[in-house]
Image: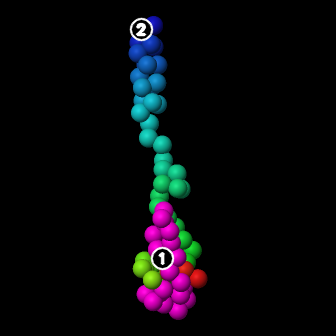
Amino acid sequence: MRALAIFIITLLLLESLYLVECSQRDRGRRTKNPFPCKQLCDNDGQCKDPCPKCRGGYWTPYECAK
């Protein structure tokens, strides 16, 4: 009976320490933009043809966008 109790407690401890796989949100930002659109920028002059505008904000980095 004592061995069964130790076994159950061990299983409970292992389950509480189990690491959950990262969610999609935690894996980083993914965009469907082509490579020039992922370029970081400070103004519109730094962006090339497919993505001529520099967009961003307080919480997002400034990147070239369509």
Please identify the dominant SS of the magenta region: loop
Q: Is residue 34 visible?
A: no
Numbered tag placed on residue 2 in the rendering: 2
Q: Residue furthest top?
A: 1
The residue drawn where x is 45% and y is 83% is: 43
The range drawn in magenta is: 44-62
* Residue 12, x across and y down, in percent: 46, 24
Question: Is 32 above or below relative to 66?
Answer: above
Q: Residue furthest bottom?
A: 49
* Residue 53, x across and y down, in percent: 53, 84
Question: Is 8 above or below relative to 24?
Answer: above
Reading the image, the residue beneath label 1 is 63
Circle 2: element type = helix
Q: Nearer the viewer, residue 39 or 6?
A: 39
* Residue 61, x across and y down, in percent: 45, 69
Q: Which amino acid lies under the numbered mark 1 shown in the image of this protein?
A: Glu
The residue drawn where x is 50% and y is 72% is: 56
